[in-house]
Each structure stands twice: as C-alpha cells, then as structure tokens.
Image (cartoon, rainbow, N blue to C red):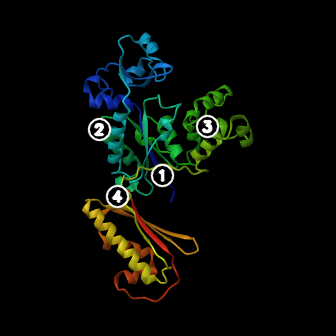
Amino acid sequence: MQQRFLYLWLTHWKTDCHRIDMPETGDDTPQTASSPQREPVVITRADHKGVLVCGSNKAAQSRGLAPGMSLAEARSIYPALRDLPEQPDLYERHLARLIRAMDRYSPWVARDRFLQEADHNHTGDAGLWLEITGGSHLFGGESALLALVLRDVKSRGYAGRAAIADTAGAAWGAARCHPAALADQRILSLPRDHDIAAGFPISALRLAEQTRVTLFRLGLKHLGDITPMPRANITTRLGPEVLQRLDQFYGRLPEHLNFNLPDRPWLIRRSFGEPLGDAANLAITVESMVTELCNNLAQENLGLRRIILRCVRVDGHTHTITLGTGSPCQSAQHVLRLLSEKMPRCRYWFWHRTGDCLRPVGRTCGLSPVAP
C-alpha cells in the first residue's frame, strides 16, 4: 500500500499562541473577509545580533514586517508596531495540546523538527506530519479529511494550511507551494502530478538558506530546473544535501520521522534461559503478556490502536508481527483473536491449549502497543 502523509502547516503559530492566551493581542483570522484587520503584532528574541523579529501575524506581514529583520527596522516601517517577547514554554504547551487533538485522525503524529533548526527557527511558524496511510476512508476520503483537519485547527484558534502527498517531503512542499487556491485541492500523487511538483520553488525541498541562495544565483529556481541535471554535477557543486532532499521528496530515499510517543513506554517483555521449543510455550507466553498489557491499559482507562509483537530467535533473527485496531481496544480476547490470524500455528493454543510440537522459536519475546 502506498504511504500517504498529511502535513499541517501552522502559518502564524507563535502569534496565534499569544492571541489565544491573551485575546487583547488581536485576532488575525477574521470570521469574514469584510471584518477589519487587527493590529500588527510581532514576536521578538534578543541575541548577540540584537532584538530580532521571530514571528509575526497576518496584519504585520501585510505591512512588510517579515521574520528575521531587526525590531528597529520593523519599527521604522510601522512605528505603532506591538512586540511581544518569545515564550518557548507557551508554544510547547500549545503544540502538545494540538498533537493530542490530532491523534483523532492518526495515531502517528510527528513534529516538524526542520523549523527548529538554526536557519529556520525565526520564522514563527510550526508544522505537524500525520501518517494517514489506509485511514483516510474513515473520514470520507482525503479531501474530506483535509477539510476536517483544517476546520478543527481553526476552531481552536490557529491559522493553518494542509496538504497530502505520497512522502513527508512532498506533503511539506505541497502545503507551502501548491498553486491550488482551495485546501481540498492540495493533494499530490506522484508520479501522476510530476508536472505540478516541477513548478514548486526550491524552498519546497527544506534546504539550508545558503544553499537556496546559491541555487537561485545559478538560475535554478524550481524543482523542474534540478531534476533533469546530472546528479554528479549537483553533488560536486552543491554537496549531497540537494540530492538527499530531492530523493526524499520523490520517495527514492526513506525519511524517518520522530513520531510523538506516549511518555509511558507500554512495553511487556519476557526473557527465557532456554529457547521456547514449541508453539504451545509461545502461545502461553503471548497470552500472558497480552493479558497483562490489557489489564494495565484498563487501569489507566486507555486503549491501544497499534500493537507490535517481536520475537527473537536463538540465531538472532527477529520475527515481528504488527496489527492495528479500528478503535481503541483494551480487550485481551479481541487482541488475541487478531494475533491468531497472523500466528496460525498458535491459533488453537490461544483457545484450546492443544497442539503439536513445532520448530524452535527463540529466547526472548516482547510486545508493545504504539500510541495507546
């Protein structure tokens, strides 16, 4: 099954967080187009370069006040500008709350770490990836899911844009650069939409600022300008970063996201001095672990959505079984029934405790649910 990623771009993240906690800072997401625009607000940070703008609302951006400029320069453009000091703890609290809300649409939610790097942490925005592979039909399709996520985000007071694509990098670029005017049209499927992706600017590749400047000076302004070029020439002139990001965009290289996991590791592990000699011992071990796990979840009033069973054999090889549930589950019988479908030799032992001796399995066995 082709992977699908939804990227949620929180365009005015820092100013939105301040506005929600302090409504007097103004609302830069008016309910109607005819509503009056609120006062310009910027977020500032003091460092060795002075006081810099590291975030701005829509009203400030419309007056040419861009993140990265000094506060003195911003005041020379708009003297009545209102500035607020940066509060990382406030943004972290809001982001953790939003991640928990996005768990409704996918148990796999990852923060956009790229925006926290040195060259990009002054932009004042934020982003989240949701892996929605095989789950969009539960919400009426990808277009309906996009609209639902954006409506949920805006109801919480955050401005945002979203896109869906085959890779995390393509979804990131589509959310920012897709020419579609409507949110439900920011859906990219490669290679079918290669012509659309070729028109994306270089900034869609998440490159360092210096690399983007170099590409622009060479006249390479769009993805379509890079893809036909010999790969060796790109690496020699610009280093490996451009090709790495380009391959991640088109899915030729995997990209590992740091998905948000629960603070408590819901892991049950069993180790044995001797190998488990038959399916009966394996089935009894798995049943005891599943029962213990589900009892722990029931005490916390939680349910699992994805569970992984990993067995390590005496020769070091690992056998992994992964299964998911349509809704949060804490029933051991239901989990064992799902596991029996992928462990046919242990199926009857889960229920009848009868069976014949089978091949050796291993010394260790571990079971862990993901994102309960």
Q: Position of residue 331 (x, y in %)?
A: 29, 69
> Quadrant where the C terminus lies?
bottom left
Q: Which mark is residue 4?
A: 1
| The one of 284 and 255 positioned closer to us in this rendering | 284
Q: CA distance from mark 3 to mark 1?
A: 21 Å
Q: Secondary structure at mark 1?
A: loop
**Residue 78, relative to residue 255: is it above or below?**
above
Residue at x-position 60% and y-position 39%: 198
Q: Residues within 10 Å of mark 3 (few under 14, many from 20)?
A: many
Of the image marks 4 and 1, the number of the one nearer the N terminus: 1
Q: CA distance from mark 4 to mark 1?
A: 21 Å
Of the image marks 3 and 1, the number of the one nearer the N terminus: 1
Residue at x-position 33% and y-position 32%: 17
Contact between marks 2 and 1 (CB within 8 A): the answer is no
Q: Residues within 10 Å of mark 4 (few under 14, many from 20)?
A: many
| The one of 33 and 126 positioned closer to us in this rendering | 126
Task: Identify residue for label 3.
Answer: 223
Q: CA distance from mark 3 to mark 2?
A: 35 Å
> Mark 1 belongs to which amino acid?
Arg
Q: CA distance from mark 2 to mark 4?
A: 24 Å
| The one of 89 and 177 positioned closer to us in this rendering | 89
Of the image marks 3 and 2, the number of the one nearer the N terminus: 2
Of the image marks 2 and 1, the number of the one nearer the N terminus: 1
Of the image marks 3 and 4, the number of the one nearer the N terminus: 3
> Mark 4 belongs to which amino acid?
Pro
Task: Identify residue for label 2.
Answer: 156
Residue mark closest to the camera, 4 vs 1: 4
Residue at x-position 42% and y-position 17%: 63
Contact between marks 3 and 4 (CB within 8 A): the answer is no
**Residue 88, relative to residue 49: is it above or below?**
below
Q: Position of residue 30 (x, y in %)?
A: 30, 27
Task: Identify residue for label 4.
Answer: 372
